[in-house]
Amino acid sequence: MTARRTDPEIQAIRDLLAARPRPAELAERRRRLDALGGSYPLPADIRVEPTRAGGVPAEWSEAPGADASRALLFLHGGGYVSGSIASHRPMVAEAGRQAGLRTLALDYRLAPEHPFPAALDDAVTGYRHLLESGFAPGRIAIGGDSAGGGLTAATLLALRDQGLPMPGCAWLVSPWVDLESASASMETKAATDPMVQKPYLLEIAAMYRGGTAARTPLVSPLYADLHGLPPLLVQVGSAETLLDEGVAFAGKAGAAEVAVTLEVWPDMIHVWHLFHPQLAAGRRAIAKAGTFIREHLAG
């Protein structure tokens, strides 16, 4: 049997990341992630507007032709300890373009300065802000990558439990939904994913949890009752360490009668969407998410 060739574009991303390893100091880690996203210029036709969502710093972005009555609330990744509006701005803007709507990227509070449930409280506040601003819940999508994907799931659980109306759909990219990082792919994919490894995840999980048990459902949504959630799109890469937990989460949601679309992308690493300006698979994945969101916010 002939071995399958690795996508040369993702190999170039691996080489890029190998040349810029994650530093030990938290402040440097934050600067590194912001620099990764900031290395791609924002398209000239994207309009951005700083704002506050119920007091939480945020940013609107909008491509030409966006439907102003629909919104994507986006929760960035970064392990709950790093990441920002700046680190994810190109990815969020492209998602808004493909979905044909406005995006509201939330600059939620980070650990260890603000441990759980600060990020979750900010995400719920951001959603409430959209409702109070006149957006119909069925015309709102929530999305996020990595920790932001886990936070998206936790936000849906919190909205359900607080009796708030659900958004029309949610988009989870490489979601970190098990802060114990106990899945087999943590080991089996360790050699192929240059983005996140188990020792790092356990380190930052402790910062975020702040003493809260790792299996608390709003910390690790994999262990939650998932009934009553809106339609979900879960996208994971076949080469990423979070592969198994993303697949398990999708399966558990489906078993709870949630409409789930699971996509496993060959050769792709953790949150490959971040590199979409130089990665065709990243552009295709965002386009697929845009189609999913358009379909579920229609009507």
Image: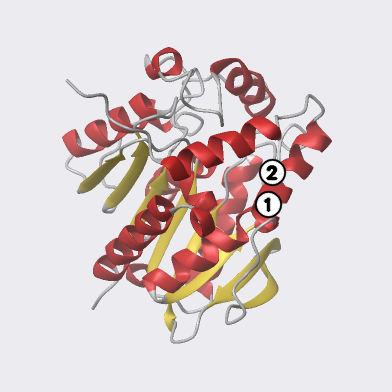
Residue located at (27% from left, 29% from top)? 4
Residue 212 occupies which quadrant of the picture?
Answer: top right
Task: Choose between 242 and 55: the one closer to the eye.
Answer: 242
N-terminal of the pair, mark 1 or mark 2, is 2
Looking at the rendered structure, the secondary structure element under dot 1 is loop
Given the image, on which type of amino acid does mark 1 rest? Ser
Depicted 63 relative to depicted 288: above or below: below
Residue located at (23% from left, 47% from top)? 261
Depicted 37 relative to depicted 298: above or below: above
Task: Choose between 225 and 153: the one closer to the eye.
Answer: 153
Q: Which residue is mark 2?
A: 33
Residue farthest toward the bottom in the current orientation of the protein? 65
Q: Is residue 5 visible?
A: yes
Depicted 152 relative to depicted 81: above or below: below
Which of discs 1 and 2 lies nearer the camera? The answer is 2
Q: Is residue 79 visible?
A: no
Looking at the rendered structure, the secondary structure element under dot 2 is helix
Tag 1 and tag 2, C-beta contact below 8 Å: yes
Q: Which residue is mark 1?
A: 84
Residue 218 in the image: state x and y as whole percent: 48, 34
Given the image, on which type of amino acid does mark 2 rest? Leu
Residue 248 in the image: state x and y as whole percent: 29, 27
Q: Few, some or many C-alpha atoms within 10 Å of disc 2 (few <14, some 14-19, many ≥20)?
A: some
Left-right relation of 206 to 152: right
Say which mark, if any, is on residue 116: none
